[in-house]
Structures are given as structure tokens and as C-alpha cells.
Amino acid sequence: MSKQHWIHDTVLYQIYPRSFYDSDDNGVGDLNGIAAKLDYLVELGIGAIWISPFYPSPMADFGYDVSNYQDVDPVFGTLDDFRALKDQAHSRGIKVIVDFVPNHTSDEHPWFIESRASRDSPKRDWYTWHEPQPDGTPPNNWQSLFGGSAWQLDKGTNQYYLHSFLAKQPDLNWDNPEVRSAMADNVRFWLEMGVDGIRVDAVNWLSKDEQLRDNPPNPDYEPAEGVDPYNAQIHTYSAMGSHIFDYLNVLQDVVKSYDDRFMIIESYPDHPGDHSHYLSFYHNLDQTVTAPFNFDAIGLPWSAQAFRSSIGSYMEKLRPGDTAIYSMGNHDQHRLATRFGQESCRTAAMMLLTLPGTPIIYYGDEIGMHDTHIPPEFVQDPFEKNNPGHNLGRDPERTPMQWSDAPHAGFTTAEPWLPISGDYTTNNVVRDLQNPRSLLTLYRELLQFRSTSDVLRYGNFELLDHHEDVFAYKRMYKEKILTILLNFSGNDVDVDISAQNLVFSTLETTEFGGSLKPHEAVILTSDN
Ligand code: NOJ
């Protein structure tokens, strides 16, 4: 058998660096803080970390507005701190994936400062500039994802520039070969330093309609629920343009020029659950070094049938060698525990860690952190500030990691940058580590089991159908078979299944007698 890429052997863990651990007592997490917690990750069983942006940034979008792609923002530390973190991670067998933000820079990036300086600037064409319409309005109807027009008038030169996100995040013009080459250099910088991969941000917007045609209205948009005018349009012309794969290939070529690296694509389909969207990345890029996240779980209700149908049909479409990366949550989405309910977290953990592909855990989900209420005066996220009161803000899922019951949850000794959930005194890492029945203990045991199970890491997948409330599947590798049963309901459920031995239960069950307890998930085998 050919050598497996490390991505197939590993469990990823996403770190939002502002909120992981504060080593220098200023209320914001940092790189040395991550280094200080590497042993925690080793004991959890994590094989790779993805760190959200830590580059110099005015922090208008908390690091997704980069003003220098080749350095570290002082709030997070220094480049030497990053090198040390990477080395310490590697010495513990942990790979390091950095976030790469290709679509836009900060408006404080020297490229944009130069671009906006005059219409004749050599960097003018590095961004998308356009004349106002005769009545002074923006060139077309495209909307910023964070609210309002995607065009900002620059008074100095009396032209509009395009920003698919904040006005402080001008879109780079990837149609310009100089931009492509400069961005390839930025990726090379990190790979040369020894990072193991990149997570590529917001790729949908890399290529747009060259004629800048207006987007059509979205006939399914319901303004009554409608808090989000961005979705009043179908983004036919403002995203997913015809060159998107050419441009991603520029990045992929750099990744491929180094051994053993990987690239993960962040791309939400316009219609949640549209698998053709995800498949386009598998088919137009190289499956041996690239895969997209699958975000279906973000929008699904907690229902066995919904997951069965979504995952079943995705698995049918993936080819051998395609890496599934099911995302259950991240720094842009409400917490898993909030979306699915605290009582479902154990089943969700079992699902995440027994599906094919590379599991990814968002920091804090392993202790069941839920969305934290953020009073208006503490709101940080521009998405919430631009659309107040519509539950769009992302602060609730970005609150500091709850390490202990010490003040500020042991995250910092200063005032934390976001409020900490009030339940930290009872829900924290120290306490969970001491509790053999905690969610954290379950995660550790499942990760341990997965790391020794070829079936879970490399096995095929086959749907089973036992009960409407049970998502059931088999994993098979060589002669070995594991059966996984996930009870999504709060009821006891009888499962008609021939005698099987219990290998693992999310509850205290020691023997499988043909029925599942409420919210129970099990792994069974027919081996003796
Ligand atoms: C996706 C990132 O995950 C999100 O946090 C960010 O605001 C946008 N892309 C813009 O970079």
C-alpha cells in the first residue's frame, strides 16, 4: 500500500490565538500561550493545529485583515516566537497549519497604501478600482458580506475600490499576475520556514466577473427573517469566477513544491448542502495535497436522518483518495454545543471521530463550551457591529478557553478581550481532566482509540439503516469491521442488529444488549 499522507492519520485542532492562552498578561492570547499548552494537546491526542491569523494587522477583522504577510503582530509575539512554537510542536509530533488570507489585505498594507495613492500608482491594478456611475453611486450592486455595498469611494482619487468584506479589507486583484506571484511568495515564506500546510481563507472571491455585472436578486430571500441583505442576491458575478481554480493552483503549486504539505480550502456554497460546490475543489485541484472543508453540519438540524442523508450522499460522491474534512464548528459559527444542544455533544464527538477523513476540533468544543452572551458594550466583531441584534456576531463562539476555575478561567490575569462564560467555574479543563465521565475524557479516549484503529483512519464507509433516530454506519478495513450507532434522540432506542460486541460507548454501558440509551453512541464489532 502507498504511504499515507499525514493528513489521513491525524486529528486537527483549530486555535483562535486571541482566545487560547495569554502568556503575557494583556488579556489577549498569544503564540507563547499556544506553546505553553502544547502538552495539553499532546495528551488530548491532537496531531496538527491550525492557527487563525497572527500576522500584523489593524485587527478590524481580528487578523483577517493582514498588513504584512511575513511577520507576527506584536500582540501575538514575534517571528522568533512563531519559530519556537513550530519547533516545539514538531518535537512533540504536532504539525502546524497557518491561515493564509489571499482574497484581501488590510487597507493599511503597504500595497494598498501605494495603490490608493494615485490613479497612476504602479500598484493601482493590484486592487480593483472603478469609476463611480454618472450619479456617483457604486459601479454595481455587489454587497459586502459584512453589510452594505462592496464598494468604497476613495475621496483622494475619486474612484471606488472593491471590498467583499470590510472597507478595511480591500480585495486584491488576482487577475494581475504580479499579485499572484507576490502571494505565492508569501506562501513560500511560511513553507520555507517549515510549516506543514495552509488553510486558505475565503477563496470564493478570488475570481469575479470581469465585466462587473450586477448580481441577480435571490428569489428565495425572505426579508421577514431577513437580517442578512447579503443573501438578498445570488452571487453569480461577485464570486466563484471562471479563474478561481487557476488562482488556487498558483498556491497549490507552491504547496506541492515542498514535501508532505497540505492545503485546506475554506469555501461555503451559496446553497448550503450543495455538494457540487465542494466537489469542484476536489476535481479541479490535486486531491493528494488539497481538500475543502465540508460545512454541511453547520446548517443541519440535530437529526439522524439529516446527517445520514448529507454524509451518505457526500461519501458516495468522493473518490478514493479524496480527503473528507467535516467541519462541526469554527470561529465563524455558533458553537456546536449551542447548535446541537449540550446533551448531544457526546454523540457529536463520536460521529466526528469515527467518520472517514480528517476530523477537526474547534478549541473548547472538547469541553463543551457553548456560545457566551456578549453584552452590547463588549461587542468586538464588526459583523455584529454592522448588523446589531441579528445573531450574526461571532464573538459568542470566540470567548477565551476555559482552563480552570481560577479568575478569568485561568486564561489570563488581565481583563480578557472578550467576556468569559459564567460557567467556567464548573466547566473547565482542570475539572474535566479529573472527571472520568467528562466530555474531555471522552474526547481523549476516542482520540486514543482512533489513533490505534486502522479501520477508523483508513477504512471504507457504508451506511446502515436501523432506526429513524439512529445514524448508523460501518467502517471496514482489510478483514476488520466496526459498526457505529449514534442515537440522536433523547429516547431509548431498540436496534435490530445481530449480536455484536461493544468496543466503545459514550455512556457507562459495558455490554450491548440491542438497545441504545438516550443520546448514546456506540462502536461495535463482530469480533470475539
Ligand atoms: C473567513 C474567516 O474565517 C472569517 O473569520 C473572516 O472574517 C472572513 N473569511 C474574511 O477574511
Image (cartoon, helix red, strand yellow):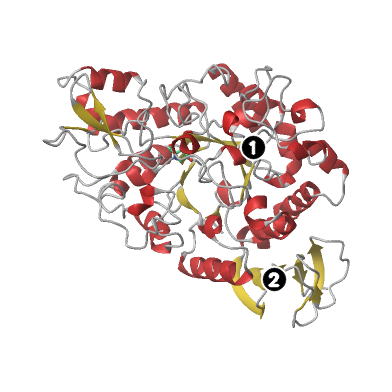
Measuring from the top left, give residue 324's x and y in whole percent. 52, 57
Measuring from the top left, give residue 442's x and y in whole percent. 78, 52
Which of the 4 image quarters holds residue 449? bottom right
Which of the 4 image quarters holds residue 492? bottom right
Q: Secondary structure at mark 1?
A: loop
> Dot 1, how many residues are within 10 Å of its Cα: few (below 14), some (14-19), or many (20+)?
many
Which of the 4 image quarters holds residue 108? top left
Quadrant in which the C terminus is drawn? bottom right
Measuring from the top left, give residue 248's x and y in whole percent. 35, 44
Q: Residue at x 36, y 21 (%)?
A: 109
Measuring from the top left, give residue 426's x and y in whole percent. 82, 40
In the picture, measured across the screen, residue 252 lies left or right of residue 95, that is: left
Quadrant in which the N terminus is drawn? bottom right
Q: Which mark is residue 67?
A: none
For the residue pair 9 and 408, the one nearer the viewer reads as: 408
Q: Quick check: can you spot residue 266?
A: yes
Q: Which amino acid is tagged 2?
A: Ile
Q: Which amino acid is tagged 1?
A: Ile
Q: Which mark is residue 481?
A: 2
**Residue at numbered disc 1:** 94
Q: Residue at x 64, y 37 (%)?
A: 94
For the residue pair 139 and 520, the one nearer the viewer reads as: 139
Q: Secondary structure at mark 2?
A: strand
